[in-house]
Amino acid sequence: QVQLVESGGGLVQAGDSLRLSCAASGRTFSNNAMGWFRQAPGKEREFVAGISWNSGSTYYTDSVKGRFTISRDNAKNTVYLQMNSLKPEDTAVYYCAASSRWSTLRIQGTEYNYWGQGTQVAVSS
């Protein structure tokens, strides 16, 4: 059974940092695209960051560029999201995702077919 398990969320103040981790089990995703999405209360899920299989390509939504960094450790079957200079508008449930079909960077949620259960990030002003 394939599982993606996120960790590292929490309640922080504006300007603080958090590092989210997503550990995959049940199969390896070392040859597959992975990404992070988030969903704030009352809003649709949105793409945050994506990374190709070999970390050669990364992409970020405009609102997090320069503040967030996605990375992966294929030996650990884990993807990370380093979040710096957090803002109240970053408050959301963050989900990691993996694609069994694509190795190159993906930004559409429909291109991912494995999802974690989510981890809450709350940023107070």
Image (tube, helix red, strand yellow):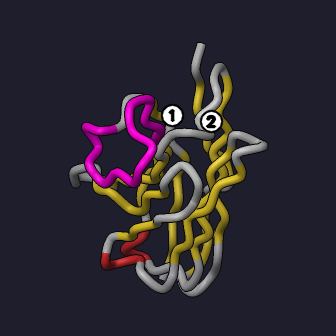
Q: Is residue 30 above or below residue 60?
A: above
Q: Please give the residue where the numbered disc 2 appears in the rendered image.
A: 5
Q: Is residue 24 above or below residue 68?
A: above
Residue at figure coordinates x 38%, y 31% from the top left: 101
Residue 100 % position (x, y): 44, 29
Sequence order check, earlier mark of 2 and 1: 2
- Decide: marks 2, 1 in contact (CB < 8 A)? yes
Q: How many marks?
A: 2
Indicate the amino acid at tag 1. Gln
Q: Please give the residue where the numbered disc 1 appears in the rendered image.
A: 117
Residue 104 on the magenta span: yes
Residue at figure coordinates x 64%, y 76% from the top left: 17
Residue 89 picture quarter: bottom left
Q: Which residues are magenta?
A: 97-111
- 1 left or right of 32 in image: right
Residue at figure coordinates x 55%, y 47% from the top left: 119
